[in-house]
Amino acid sequence: GGLSAVASLARYTLKLLSIGPKGGLLTGPFSKVLDNNDVSHPFIRKWFDYLAFALSGLDAAHTQAAPVVYTMRDLHSNNAILDYPKGGMSSLIDALVSGITKHGGSVRTNALVEKVILENNGKGAECSGVVLQNGDLIKARRGVVCNAPLWNMARILRDSLEEEDSREKEDDPNESKIRAAVKKIQQSADDLCMTGSFMHLHLGIPADGLDDLECHHSVLDFSLDITAEQNMVIISIPTVFDPDLAPDGYHIVHAYTAACDSFEPWVEYLDGKEEGGKVGVSPNSGTSASYGRAEGYQTLKEEKGDVLWKAVECVIPDVRQRAKQKGSIALVGTPLTHRRYNQRFRGTYGPAPSPGKDVWVLGGSNTGIRKLLACGDTCFPGIGLPGVAASGTIAANTLASVRAQSKLMSELKSKGALQ
């Protein structure tokens, strides 16, 4: 922030000035862009609702214009192609891990953070490290960057406060500053609305006779509101682009309801029948999967999953028969599965605008606790891979010097990765 931000933006001064009053349009709802350009055809308006929903889980009236505009430019630029990573998502993960390890860092998996170490530095709350669930203590030299959604981060911070709540501690000004900082973050989490969740269908099926498949499909009823329960199903068949992702002769199919499944029917299967903001154990453990053994869960799972099978049948009419053949795999995931494996509060896709607001208003990397930075889709710019990557960049830039940042920007520009 401050002078550092001004120095970082200096090379883009003319570009920023050229945006002028259009900047307000980009941070407002995309529907205003359509209104300003007299776009009124019902189908086109509905199509942009669809595109906005696919990006953010919200219609065009509640999705910021910037990501929609960026996507449209990307889709319709000269010689536009669909970028798809060879090796699937794991290749992206491997690349990110490589970026850390080649600079001397390390990556731990199945290492859940149990607590954040909070201290008072004389001026307020400060984070000095984390404690993992296995008891390991990791001290931070520069800071801790938390990519947990705001709702989950608030729960971790609450758990990080000392259990004892004696009168002496309450009267201790140092203790009260830490509690006040945590309470402020909790209030922000309580005030942040959220989008819906997902049902998932993962298939490995015989590929014989499926020679003319396209990779991506969206199945929805345009006569309904784009945000209607289970109205939009998105289907991806990545083996169309990369056959090596599956054994010879098989296709992988992933279908999901795009943030249009309510979490409410699933709450009763949670421990204590309420969302506490913490999954608490490894997603691969039997404890975390205990809801699957609860009475009524499998019936609800089958009922809610049927929309996915019907959607895939629009692309592969005999998919149910293929899924029963020897060697096939069929796995259905619910909002509880999504919550469990992705550590998502109420299985949500991400933030939604507060009541009375057209678009979400999200904070940046600053949490109010020194040396604790936030990134992810509950931070600016918001939902989606580009937005989350940008939030991570903002957090990293906050820790880096202006000189190091400028050097990296120059390198990226020389490689064509930055304008």
Image: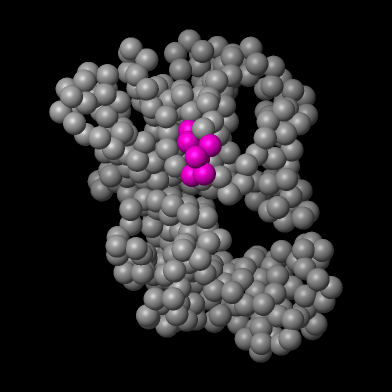
Position of residue 73 measured from the top left corner of the image (x, y, whole percent): 62, 44
Residue 315, located in which quarter of the rendered image? bottom right
Residue 174, relative to residue 362: is it above or below? above
What stretch of residues is rendered in magenta? 130-136
State the count of labels: 0
- Residue at image position (80%, 82%) is 208
- Residue at image position (31%, 33%) is 162
Q: Is residue 123 magenta?
A: no
- Residue in the foreground of this view, choosing between 230 and 287: 287
Position of residue 42 measured from the top left corner of the image (x, y, whole percent): 43, 64
Q: Is residue 134 magenta?
A: yes
Please say whether residue 39 is visible from this viewpoint: no
- Residue in the foreground of this view, choosing between 158 and 42: 158
Question: What coloring was used for the rendering?
Answer: one colour
- Residue at image position (71%, 87%) is 325
Placement of the C terminus among the 4 image quadrants: top right
- Residue at image position (34%, 19%) is 120
Residue 217, located in which quarter of the rendered image? bottom right
Residue 264, relative to residue 356: is it above or below? below
Residue 334, relative to residue 24: is it above or below? below
Position of residue 8 measured from the top left corner of the image (x, y, whole percent): 57, 16
Q: Is residue 359 left or right of residue 397?
A: left
Residue 245, located in which quarter of the rendered image? bottom right
Please say whether residue 196 is visible from this viewpoint: yes
Position of residue 304 measured from the top left corner of the image (x, y, whole percent): 44, 77
Residue 58, relative to residue 11: is it above or below? below
Q: Is residue 256 left or right of residue 349?
A: right
